[in-house]
Image: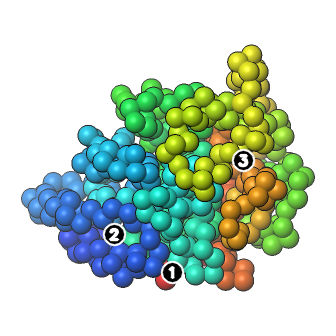
């Protein structure tokens, strides 16, 4: 059942929250041994929360818009009373004092956390593999990789172990799992959702404030919208979050869509281009004004993003590196080799460049409120062993549209479009800041025409 269907059934009393939790625990018991997505099963607290919700509903209390919906949470997001391990032994006993803001908001809406999910060590790495919990496997069975650092939530949602997964994305880490696992995901606008991203009590530096954003993964666009409406808002723990309205002004005419199958002209696989064209045709048939256009300032954005990330990580790398294995450190070491940390004057100039590039994007989006493009310019697939430097660069460039949209802080929705050779395919719809509503509506039109692909396994 979709999250919205579960909530409706629990709210009406057709099923109990306790039944929902038991069904998900049974599914996890059946599927997780093979998929290895859920790292900490919260059976006791989930049953207790479900019983409490059922009592309150029976007493006539409002159970919330996501009543009884089971959700998973990435290992770097706090759940009260549960270790936030980040996948490494150093934080094995790092028990959270309180829910992170998005967990608290979902819980207040009646949703029930049912487990933590796997991620790479400290979110550093190209696959969902951690020292503490091993490798998560894509439930489709045709490829092993569940995609990017929120692959545990992508796999859990695709396999039916949860209706919603809560991950985070700083360059494609909820959109990549959505693509690889055949589900949907929302990377929100900068400042849309309140977050808590301290690691070991340390506050995040500038790049870690600007780029990572918590976001939901679900099996339908309607479920994404329901989660979005709950997660949006402010919290005193996060000064970035703003009280923007959920919906902007209604369009007065056909919404213009810039279609970019090959961002920056750096190459795109023909199978990916075909999916972009399919989705563009759907939007055109739905009344959107579709036009082929490339996005602005892509090379400059990628270069600037790299400078900010590696300079920030370079300062803390001597402290972080001992927590990692050689395999889990390789991804960042390749990043540092490709773009070495820069001097303080160059770093300050990079912050100014980001301001200019973001302005370029806002002017572009003033004319094209939506952009349709690939999550990756290569289809989902696997690599044998650890990638070499050439493969690393290829994978990074394939996800370039994810990187640049994280860099400028605009929202994007990843949505599946079909299956090719047994592997799920998809696209993303990008919009103006705080116009998630337009992105979700367009993604919903694509889903309505092309269907949903999960649960699988």
- Residue identifier under label 3: 334
Residue 306 pos. (x, y %): 73, 37
Q: Disc 2 and disc 1: Cα gap in Å?
A: 18 Å
Above or below, 416 relative to 323: below
Numbered disc 1: secondary structure = loop
Q: If you read the primary sequence from the N terminus, does the residue marked by circle 3 or circle 1 appear first?
A: 3
Residue 293 pos. (x, y %): 86, 50
Q: Which residue corresponds to the image point at 35% horizontal and 75% vertical from the top-left?
A: 28
Quick one: 416 or 367, which is closer to the camera? 416
154 vs 96, left or right, is right
Q: Are marks 2 and 1 in contact (CB under 8 Å)?
A: no
Residue 74 pos. (x, y %): 43, 54
Above or below, 274 relative to 153: below
Label 1 crowding class (10 Å Cα cut-off): few <14, some 14-19, many 20+? some
Colouring of the image: rainbow
Quick one: 41 or 281, which is closer to the camera? 41
Above or below, 300 relative to 254: above
Numbered disc 2: secondary structure = helix
Let me know if residue 372 appears in the view: no
- Residue identifier under label 2: 6
Q: Disc 2 and disc 3: Cα gap in Å?
A: 44 Å
Q: If you read the primary sequence from the N terminus, does the residue marked by circle 2 or circle 1 appear first?
A: 2
Q: Disc 3 and disc 1: Cα gap in Å?
A: 34 Å
Label 2 crowding class (10 Å Cα cut-off): few <14, some 14-19, many 20+? many
Q: Are marks 3 and 1 in contact (CB under 8 Å)?
A: no
Q: Which mark is residue 456?
A: 1
Q: Are marks 2 and 3 in contact (CB under 8 Å)?
A: no
Of circles 2 and 1, the one toward us is: 1
Q: Which residue corresponds to the image point at 21% horizontal and 54% vertical from the top-left?
A: 62
The quadrant holding residue 414 is bottom right
Of circles 2 and 3, the one toward us is: 3
């Amino acid at each position: 059942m979709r999250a919205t269907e579960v909530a409706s059934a629990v709210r009406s009393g057709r099923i109990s929250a306790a039944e929902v939790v038991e069904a998900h625990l049974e599914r996890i018991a059946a599927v997780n041994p093979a998929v290895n997505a859920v790292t900490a099963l919260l059976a006791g607290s989930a049953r207790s929360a479900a019983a409490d919700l059922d009592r309150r509903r029976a007493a006539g209390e409002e159970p919330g818009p996501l009543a009884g919906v089971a959700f998973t949470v990435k290992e770097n997001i706090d759940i009260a009373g549960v270790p936030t391990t980040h996948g490494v032994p150093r934080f094995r006993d790092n028990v959270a004092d309180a829910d992170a803001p998005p967990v608290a908001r979902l819980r207040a809406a009646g949703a029930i956390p049912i487990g933590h999910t796997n991620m790479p060590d400290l979110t550093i790495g190209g696959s969902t593999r951690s020292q503490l919990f091993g490798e998560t496997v894509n439930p489709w069975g045709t490829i092993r990789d569940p995609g990017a650092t929120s692959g545990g939530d992508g796999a859990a949602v695709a396999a039916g172990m949860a209706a919603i997964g809560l991950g985070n994305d700083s360059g494609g880490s909820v959109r990549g799992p959505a693509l690889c696992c055949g589900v949907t995901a929302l990377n929100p606008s900068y400042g849309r959702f309140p977050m808590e991203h301290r690691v070991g009590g340390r506050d995040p530096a500038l790049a870690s404030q600007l780029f990572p954003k918590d976001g939901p993964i679900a099996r339908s666009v309607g479920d994404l919208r329901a989660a979005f409406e709950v997660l949006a808002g402010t919290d005193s723990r996060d000064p970035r979050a703003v009280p923007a309205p959920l919906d902007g002004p209604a369009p007065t005419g056909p919404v213009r869509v810039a279609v970019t199958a090959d961002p920056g002209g750096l190459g795109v696989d023909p199978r990916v281009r075909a999916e972009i064209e399919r989705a563009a045709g759907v939007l055109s048939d739905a009344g959107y004004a579709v036009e082929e256009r490339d996005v602005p300032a892509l090379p400059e954005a990628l270069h600037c993003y790299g400078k900010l990330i590696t300079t920030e990580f370079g300062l803390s790398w001597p402290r972080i590196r001992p927590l990692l294995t050689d395999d889990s450190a390789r991804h960042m070491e390749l990043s540092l080799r490709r773009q070495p940390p820069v001097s303080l004057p160059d770093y300050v100039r990079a912050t100014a460049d980001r301001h200019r590039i973001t302005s370029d994007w806002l002017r572009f989006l003033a004319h094209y409120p939506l952009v349709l493009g690939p999550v990756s310019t290569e289809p989902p697939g696997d690599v044998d062993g650890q990638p070499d430097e050439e493969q690393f660069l290829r994978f990074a460039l394939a996800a370039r549209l994810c990187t640049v949209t994280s860099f400028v802080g605009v929202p994007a929705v990843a949505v599946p479009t079909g299956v090719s050779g047994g592997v799920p395919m998809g696209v993303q719809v990008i919009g103006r800041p705080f116009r998630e509503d337009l992105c979700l509506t367009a993604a919903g039109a694509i889903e309505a025409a092309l269907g949903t692909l999960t649960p699988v396994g």
